[in-house]
Image (cartoon, rainbow, N blue to C red):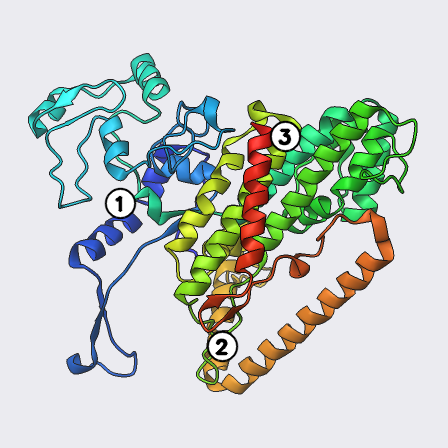
């Protein structure tokens, strides 16, 4: 996986359209040719060339996807990038029509030329019903500017006369599971923890838990302007820290509810207020469902590789893909039902709704949906942005002897070339390193298990990702089919109770 673009603009369509223009041009050429012709780098013979079909996929966070579609972020009438779900129905389990490239173009008052089987004309705008019979009708309409353009974006959720940046159907744009899970943790924190932090004493207690249990150290002056309570309300977490907060979600709930650490929500002691006990139990269940969903996303369908040729993972079988999609559908549905019961439908955000589409995307992919997500490039992208903005000026700076050193980007490029050459020359060392990495991973999992057992009640149910829902497939048949059916019935029951 390689980073093809570095988006340095804000969440804006025009920045993205300008920076990705050359890449989009290449994509259109490949799509028009039906694929690309490749050959072995060691031979130039035409007989050795082969033609490969190319299927483009895009994965990123919600802001990037909305901008790529020409939409106005998550503030429009239909904030979901994949379906026509209205903003006031995000918390409902209704089915809505899917968005298409044709819809996005027509809502911008332009024809769609992506699907050659359907003629672009005539068409009408799906929002205002304005009809366009020919290209001349489109050309006659002048592009809106100023206040008129702003009102058009507000009513149509699209930029006037702007096609989506990437020539892809929305079904080929995959939600990033990393940003999805982190956003879910943030929403659960806001409604379950942040809204109940009343004073500095409670804020200090929560801050100490964040530091001790999750390794989160906040700059109180920068985040909360000196107020610990305000800083704890505005917590924004990364991957490992967000997972740690989800694991200890019940511990934070006990702190804000003023309950002892050994409080059992299934058997509350005498004297506990009924409303507090019931609300605590509902909110704690949201944390358990969130961790279970995280485990389901993180669990791989299988660990088969094409060894001894290489150590690349093999695609999943049809049965494995179907079972994984079913697990995702159940896990996300149970999380939404718990979230709805605890916080209400009005607390749903676009990211909460996006979980409905994870299982749909999984059915169209060969590997786990998380393997297509953007988190693989998240850290590298931040480093490259730092190099580009701050450190690349070294090219023009000379030392005391007048010698100019290579830029950090050039150094990293040369180091990468050396690494690739070494791997080609010594493949046995690559395999050895991979096995060592696997062993270290198993040791880390074991340490987490021992740590969880030591903490006892401080850790929520299924707090270790590797101990979550497991999948086994034997002879193409789902071993856990009965268990999944039971969980699906439980999810339907929970959804019905919440409604």
> Mark 3 Cα within 10 Å, few/some/many (few <14, many 20+)?
many
The one nearer the camera, 308 or 146, is 308
Looking at marks 2 and 1 on the same chain, the residue that comes earlier in the sequence is marked by: 1
Few, some or many C-alpha atoms within 10 Å of disc 2 (few <14, some 14-19, many ≥20)?
Answer: some
Whether residues under marks 2 and 3 lie with C-beta atoms below 8 angstroms apart, the answer is no
Q: Position of residue 464 (x, y in %)?
A: 70, 56
Quadrant for residue 450, please give it: bottom right
Q: Is residue 46 rendered to the left or right of residue 392? A: left
Q: Position of residue 304 (x, y in %)?
A: 50, 74
Of the image marks 1 and 3, the number of the one nearer the N terminus: 1
Pick whichever, 385 or 470, lies toward us.
470
Q: Residue furthest top?
A: 147
Residue at 11% x, 20% y is 140
Residue lying farthest to the right in this orientation: 270
| Quarter of the N terminus within the rendering | bottom left
Q: Secondary structure at mark 2?
A: loop
* Residue located beneath label 1 in the image: 167
Q: In which image quadrant can residue 343 be found? A: top right
- Residue highlighted by disc 3: 341
* Contact between labelled residues 3 and 1, with CB atoms less than 8 Å apart: no
> In this rendering, which labeled residue sits more in front, label 2 or label 3?
3
Residue under pointer 2: 311
Front residue of 59/360: it is 360
- At numbered mark 1, what does the secondary structure look like: helix, strand or loop? loop
């Amino acid at each position: 996986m390689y980073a093809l673009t570095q988006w340095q603009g804000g969440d804006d369509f025009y920045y993205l359209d300008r920076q990705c223009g050359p890449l989009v041009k290449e994509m259109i050429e490949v799509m028009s040719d039906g694929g690309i012709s490749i050959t072995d780098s060691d031979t130039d013979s035409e007989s050795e060339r082969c033609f490969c079909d190319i299927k483009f996929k895009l994965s990123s966070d919600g802001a990037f996807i909305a901008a790529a579609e020409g939409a106005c972020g998550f503030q429009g009438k239909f904030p979901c990038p994949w379906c026509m779900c209205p903003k006031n129905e995000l918390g409902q389990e209704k089915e809505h029509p899917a968005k298409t490239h044709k819809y996005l173009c027509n809502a911008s008052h332009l024809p769609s030329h992506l699907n050659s089987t359907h003629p672009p004309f005539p068409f009408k705008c799906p929002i205002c019903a304005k009809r366009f019979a020919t290209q001349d009708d489109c050309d006659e309409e002048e592009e809106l500017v100023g206040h008129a353009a702003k009102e058009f974006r507000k009513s149509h959720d699209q930029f006037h006369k702007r096609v989506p940046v990437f020539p892809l159907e929305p079904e080929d744009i995959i939600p990033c599971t990393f940003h999805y899970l982190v956003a879910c943790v943030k929403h659960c924190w806001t409604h379950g923890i942040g809204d109940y932090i009343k004073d500095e004493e409670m804020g200090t207690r929560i801050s100490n838990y964040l530091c001790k249990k999750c390794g989160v150290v906040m700059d109180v002056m920068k985040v909360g302007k000196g107020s610990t309570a305000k800083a704890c309300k505005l917590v924004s977490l990364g991957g490992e820290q967000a997972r740690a907060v989800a694991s200890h979600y019940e511990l934070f709930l006990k702190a804000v509810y003023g309950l002892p650490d050994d409080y059992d929500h299934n058997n509350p002691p005498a004297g506990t207020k009924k409303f507090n006990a019931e609300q605590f139990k509902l909110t704690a269940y949201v944390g358990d469902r969130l961790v279970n969903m995280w485990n389901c996303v993180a669990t791989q369908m299988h660990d088969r590789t094409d060894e001894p040729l290489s150590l690349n993972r093999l695609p999943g079988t049809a049965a494995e893909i179907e079972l994984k999609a079913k697990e995702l559908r159940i896990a996300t549905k149970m999380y939404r039902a718990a979230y709805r019961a605890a916080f209400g439908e009005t607390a749903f955000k676009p990211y909460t709704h996006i979980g409905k589409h994870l299982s749909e995307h999984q059915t169209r992919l060969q590997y786990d949906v998380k393997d297509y997500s953007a988190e693989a490039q998240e850290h590298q992208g931040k480093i490259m942005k730092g190099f580009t903005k701050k450190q690349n000026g070294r090219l023009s700076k000379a030392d005391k002897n007048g010698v100019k050193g290579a830029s950090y980007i050039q150094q990293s490029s040369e180091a990468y070339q050396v690494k690739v050459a070494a791997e080609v020359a010594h493949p046995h060392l690559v395999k050895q390193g991979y096995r060592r990495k696997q062993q270290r991973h198993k040791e880390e999992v074991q340490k987490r298990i021992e740590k969880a057992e030591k903490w006892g009640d401080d850790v929520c149910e299924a707090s270790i990702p590797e101990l979550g829902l497991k999948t086994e497939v034997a002879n193409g048949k789902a071993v856990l089919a009965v268990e999944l059916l039971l969980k699906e019935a439980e999810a339907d029951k929970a959804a019905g109770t919440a409604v």
